[in-house]
Image (spheres, rainbow, N blue to C red):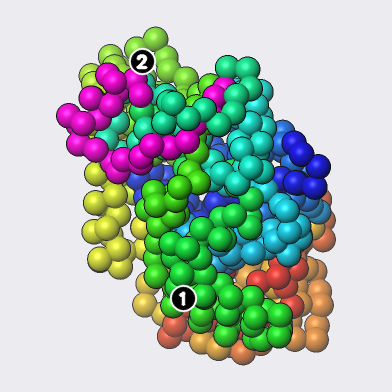
């Protein structure tokens, strides 16, 4: 890579992954799941980009609701990522998110390159990935907006396609070739997709990009001037140290637009590198076939599954035993509060289920019964009018924020470990079997000073028991909202 052109990986981690419901939820999206390996997808992505840049250069583009869980999953790099989060106050699609990240890169390095990658893809072949990034970086230095093209292996209707200009070779490195883009093609119907695969002149659009931060901002200004104008206002507000609320309000006014349709499909600077690594966006339960290990019958099986004579099916059991007999090309996913059963061929339609749950305002689309937090987790055991019962776990060294509730009281009973309690000005330890009450509007904190995980049973009482009834006074994780 040329001198003075450092690479800044930007991991796009704000999606919800609705097609992996019920395992993924709005507040626990696909990138936080273990798919195709022992590490979660975002951990796999982080390890992958470190082949091209140091961890201190990595930026995580996400939102405040997901940032805490991502920090937990990327704890191995927490010292390098202290300033590495670019938070959207509200999702406005990829063009504004990338523009926000590009502005951050420019503040660090006017000549900086960006490697933009989704957090929830599976890539096999680190050396091939590194080589593709190196060639793409060379083209980006020359002023191109580079995307990675995947050779199609089937007539997929869920992906966009790219047709390279085979006569305009921009650069090469070993087996890799970089071409000018002749045209982008939106997600085609089945007939068109089959034609593209047969023609052998089209690539899948992977959604991974390399460009100079300055170049992509110039093209956003050219093709999406309203986004650029909003970024100018945000930059000025930040320079004047305006309140965060004022910055967030500007961002929320931006029109939702993707970087593909808003910029890449219009720009004359678009280029494509045909990659040689294996890739899957793992877009639905059916796509697990591409990345997960199968048994002799072609089944992908996880958890406590007892199967008799099923074939080519996907069966996931969380806690309970799941028994299946004679299934063929089916998906069965069981979690503590929701179960999915559908043919593989209809796996893309899981999004329709999530849309219905949203319309019903059902909690099952939002989060799991067990909710992960930076300090541990909590599980809702029972709830009804005026009460809620939780099991709360606090990791060794972890502690909740110093907080207060306006509408609810709490009663804590320790069932494992030793809990340290702050209640107004009193600080004391509780051992197994001991308990304490936290009245309404009492400042309090729960922490774990020991080496054993603390488990407590928490009983809440009050007219409103929502997680947003919270005032934080101090917090180890930089949170200012109820998340």
| Residue 170 seen anywhere in this rendered image of the structure | yes
Quadrant of res 298: top left
Residue 198 lies in the magenta-colored region: yes
As drawn, is 408 to the left or to the right of 328?
right
Question: Can you give x and y, in whole percent of width and height, for residue 120 in the image?
Answer: 51, 42
Q: Which residues are magenta?
A: 176-201
Residue 27 appearing in the image: no
Q: Residue furthest front?
A: 167
Tell me if label 2 and label 1 are in contact, CB under 8 Å: no
Of residue 271 and residue 444, the one placed in the foreground of this image is 271
Quarter of the view holding residue 339: top left
Judged from the image, the secondary structure of the residue bearing numbered disc 1 is: helix
On residue 298, the disc is: 2
Q: Residues within 10 Å of mark 1 (few under 14, many from 20)?
A: some
Residue placed furthest toward the left: 191
The answer to if 98 sits in the magenta stretch is: no
Residue drawn 20% across and 36% down?
189
**Dividing the picture into quarters, in which one does residue 71 lie?**
bottom right
Q: Residue at x 29, y 20 (%)?
A: 199
Residue 459 versus residue 38 in the image, above or below: below
Q: Which residue is mark 1?
A: 252
First in sequence: mark 2 vs mark 1: 1
Q: Quadrant of the N terminus?
A: top right
Query: Could you give the CA–CA distance between mark 2 and mark 1, rounded to whole angstroms?
Result: 47 Å
Q: Is residue 461 left or right of residue 298?
A: right
How many numbered callouts?
A: 2
> Residue at left 25%, top 51%?
353
């Amino acid at each position: 890579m040329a001198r003075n052109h450092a690479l800044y990986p930007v991991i796009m981690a704000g999606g919800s992954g609705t097609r992996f419901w019920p395992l993924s939820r709005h507040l626990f999206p696909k990138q936080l799941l273990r798919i195709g390996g022992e590490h979660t997808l975002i951990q796999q992505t982080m390890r992958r980009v470190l082949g091209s840049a140091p961890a201190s250069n990595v930026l995580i583009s996400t939102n405040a609701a997901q940032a805490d869980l991502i920090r937990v999953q990327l704890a191995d790099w927490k010292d390098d990522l202290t300033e590495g989060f670019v938070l959207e106050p509200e999702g406005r699609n990829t063009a504004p998110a990338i523009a926000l990240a590009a502005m951050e890169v420019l503040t660090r390095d006017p000549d900086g390159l960006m490697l933009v990658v989704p957090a929830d893809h599976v890539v096999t072949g680190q050396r091939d990935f590194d080589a593709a990034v190196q060639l793409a970086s060379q083209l980006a230095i020359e002023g191109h907006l580079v995307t990675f093209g995947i050779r199609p292996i089937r007539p997929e209707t869920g992906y966009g396609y790219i047709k390279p200009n085979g006569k305009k070779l921009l650069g090469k490195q070993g087996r890799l070739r970089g071409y000018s883009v002749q045209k982008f093609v939106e997600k085609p119907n089945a007939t068109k997709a089959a034609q593209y695969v047969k023609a052998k002149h089209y690539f899948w659009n992977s959604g991974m990009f390399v460009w100079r931060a300055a170049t992509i901002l110039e093209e956003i200004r050219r093709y999406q001037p309203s986004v650029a104008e909003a970024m100018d206002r945000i930059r000025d507000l930040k320079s004047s140290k305006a309140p965060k609320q004022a910055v967030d309000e500007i961002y929320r006014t931006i029109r939702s637009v993707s970087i593909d349709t808003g910029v890449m499909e219009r720009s004359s600077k678009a280029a494509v590198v045909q990659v040689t690594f294996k890739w899957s966006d793992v877009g639905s339960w059916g796509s697990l076939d591409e990345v997960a290990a199968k048994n002799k019958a072609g089944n992908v099986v996880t958890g406590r599954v007892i199967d008799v004579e099923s074939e080519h099916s996907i069966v996931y059991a969380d806690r309970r035993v799941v028994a299946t007999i004679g299934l063929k090309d089916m998906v069965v996913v069981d979690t503590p509060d929701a179960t999915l059963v559908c043919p593989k061929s209809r796996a893309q339609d899981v999004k329709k289920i999530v849309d219905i749950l949203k319309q019903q305002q059902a909690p099952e689309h939002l989060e799991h019964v067990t909710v992960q937090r930076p300090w541990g987790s909590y599980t809702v055991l029972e709830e009804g009018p005026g009460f809620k019962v939780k099991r709360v776990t606090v990791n060794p060294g972890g502690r909740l924020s110093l907080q207060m509730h306006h509408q609810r009281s709490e009663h804590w009973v320790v069932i494992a470990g030793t809990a340290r309690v702050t209640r107004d000005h009193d600080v004391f330890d509780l051992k197994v079997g001991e308990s304490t009450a936290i009245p309404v509007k009492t400042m309090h904190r729960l922490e774990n000073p020991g080496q054993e995980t603390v488990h407590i049973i928490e009983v809440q009482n009050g007219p409103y028991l929502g997680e947003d009834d919270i005032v934080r006074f101090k917090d180890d994780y930089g949170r200012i909202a109820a998340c």
